[in-house]
Image (spheres, rainbow, N blue to C red):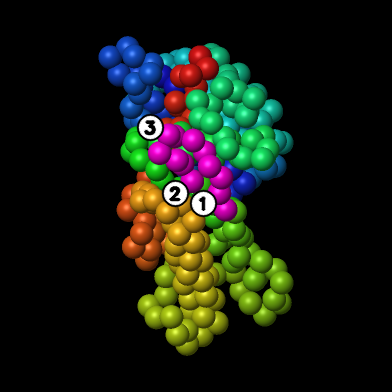
Amino acid sequence: MLLVIDIGNTSIMFGVFRAIASKHQDRKLVGYRRISTEKLKGADKYGPQILKLLNHAGISPSEIKDIIISSVVPSLVATFRELCKTYFKGKVFVFKLSTQSGIMILCDNPKEVGTDRVANALAAFKLYKKPAIIVDFGTATTFDVVTAKGEYAGGVIAPGIGVSARALFKAASKLPYVELAKPGKALGKNTIESMQSGLIWGTVGQVKQIIGQLKRELKIKVLVIATGGYADIISKEVESIKIVNPTLTLEGLALIYDRNS
């Protein structure tokens, strides 16, 4: 069994993969869980969350033989190393861009690209075998382009919808922090509805515009894939998004682990 841990600024995802027919290069995701990132939590707080996932999937901790960690929060890497040492006996592999990722990165400085974005690109090409734009709705809303050859061509980074909501709450003393839900109409009749409208429809407009601009620059037909914690909220309103895959990053990290194990 392979345990995959993807640590983001807003949320952390855990996934468990089972090898099919004893072939580690062919794995099936048997369970996953997403929780909020809390940087001050220790291994004793995160550990039970993973155990809940394993219990729900009917998996014993002793079955976890391999672990991969990807993190954009450096302070939590040591926490999760400690966690894995405490709860599991499997070997731990921390994915860094110096690792063989299996994908060519066509950027000025490949080391600047987030490990989660590389994992997304690898998984998208492996699963769908088409040039693609991947929209990841996380702390930032990122747009990543994968070529027909499976290369990472570059991307776009924009403020995420959650960041925008928190910025409004912090910067404007009279505005509350609101639930990120689609209002019934764009025309809000109160402060909450007005903020929800601006956040949701503003993000929808941003996503449509950036996807359209990327398509015009690429001049080829691409598959648009959405992932990330806010994908379900926004993707329903963007016709060009054809696939929503909430576990895309986990699947990419599993592929990277197998390339390096």
Q: Residues within 10 Å of mark 3 (few under 14, many from 20)?
A: some
Residue type pointed to by label 3 = Lys
Could you tell me residue 33's position as x and y percent? 44, 39
Neighbourhood count class around disc 1 (C-alpha, 10 Å): few under 14, some 14–19, many 20 upward: many
Q: Quadrant location of residue 172?
A: bottom right
**Residue at (56, 22) in percent of width and height:** 100
> On the rendered structure, is 71 left or right of 13?
right
Q: Earlier in the sequence, mark 2 or mark 3?
A: 3
Q: Secondary structure at mark 3?
A: helix
Tell which of 229 and 132 is nearer to you. 132
Q: Earlier in the sequence, mark 1 or mark 3?
A: 3
- The answer to whether the residues at label 1 and label 3 have Cβ atoms under 8 Å apart is no
* Amino acid at pointer 2: Ile
The residue tagged 2 is: 133
Earlier-in-chain disc, 2 versus 1:
2
- Badge 3 is on which residue? 126
The image quadrant of residue 74 is top right
